[in-house]
Structure formats: C-alpha cells, structure tokens
Image (tube, grey):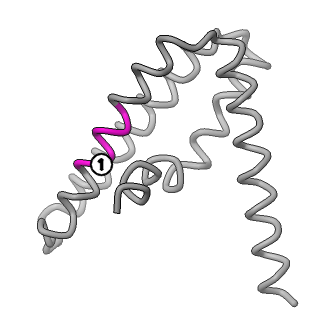
C-alpha cells in the first residue's frame, strides 16, 4: 500500500514528467523551475479531472485515503531529500529513472505482443 501510494504520482503522470527534461534542455529552465512547472500542470490536470467527475463519482474513501496519505507522506519526504541532494545529482537520477521506466514500458509491451 505504501509503495502504491508513494508511486501513484509518478505512474499516473509519466507523460507530464517527460516535460521536465524538455523544459531544461530546450527552454533553459533550471531543474527546480522545470519540476515546479510540471507539478503545477499535474495539480491543474488533477483538479480539473476531479472537478468534472466529482458529481458522478462514488469514491470509496476507505480505499482512497490510504493512497492519499502515503502520497502526501512521499511528497513531504521527497522534498526533504531534495533539499539535501545537489541539483546535478537529482537531474542525473531523474534521467536514469526515465530510462528505467521507458525500458520497463518497452519490455512489457513487447512481452504482450509476443
């Protein structure tokens, strides 16, 4: 449950997270500014989706609250870690994460095709 909640943002927003390297490389954003921009886009997208569907959803809060709780804990801990790690290391680690996610996606797609 903890892993699912803390990874929820990353898994659900891979396409938005790909914008971070594009902003850094093509528009000369600093890494913190690019990450901030990505988070703003994610927040707006999530708020719009929830707002448009709020009246028609029957949310099972007993199931949703643990994910929400662990997602918030993950964000708070991530902020504390990010404040202590140099930006260059965060950038390198982020690129490695994107490569791993891309390899996983490609591998699982190929396995399903075969």
Examine the rendered structure and indicate whether residue 95 appears above or below residue 79.
Answer: below
Residue 30 place in picture, x, y as percent: 64, 9
CA neighbours of label 1 inside 10 A, class few (<14), some (14 to 19), many (20+):
some
Residue 89: name its quadrant: top right
Question: Foreground: 48 or 82?
Answer: 82
Identify the residue shown where x is 70% and y is 30%.
93
Residue 22: x and y, percent? 73, 28
* Front residue of 5 and 9: 5
With respect to residue 22, does 30 lie above or below?
Answer: above
Q: Residue furthest bottom?
A: 114
Give the residue displayed 34% in from the left and 47% down from the top.
Answer: 46
Q: What kind of element bears circle 1?
A: helix
Q: Is residue 21 left or right of residue 4?
A: right
Question: What is the total number of numbered labels drawn onto the structure image?
Answer: 1
In the rendered image of this protein, does residue 74 appear above or below residue 100? above
**How far across and down, in percent of the image, does residue 27 sit?**
72, 14
**Residue 85 horizontal/vertical position (percent):** 57, 14
Q: Which residue is mark 1?
A: 70
* Magenta highlight on residue 12: no
Q: Is residue 41 above or below residue 89?
A: below
Classify the position of the C terminus by image quarter.
bottom right
Main secondary structure found in the magenta portion: helix
**Taking 64 as reference, is 32 left or right?**
right
Position of the N terminus by quadrant: bottom left
Q: Which residues are magenta?
A: 69-75
Q: Residue at x 28, y 44 (%)?
A: 47
Identify the residue shown where x is 28% and y is 39%.
Answer: 72
Q: Does residue 93 appear to the left or right of 82 in the view shown?
A: right
Query: Front-most of 39 and 49?
Result: 39
């Amino acid at each position: 449950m903890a892993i699912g909640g803390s990874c929820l943002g990353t898994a659900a927003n891979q396409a938005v997270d790909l914008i971070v390297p594009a902003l850094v490389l093509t528009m000369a954003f600093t890494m913190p500014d690019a990450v901030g921009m990505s988070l703003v886009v994610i927040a707006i997208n999530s708020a719009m989706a929830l707002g448009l569907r709020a009246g028609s959803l029957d949310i099972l809060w007993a199931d949703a609250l643990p994910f929400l709780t662990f997602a918030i804990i993950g964000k708070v801990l991530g902020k504390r870690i990010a404040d202590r790690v140099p930006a260059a290391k965060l950038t390198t680690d982020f690129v490695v994460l994107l490569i791993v996610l891309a390899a996983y996606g490609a591998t699982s797609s190929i396995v399903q095709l075969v």
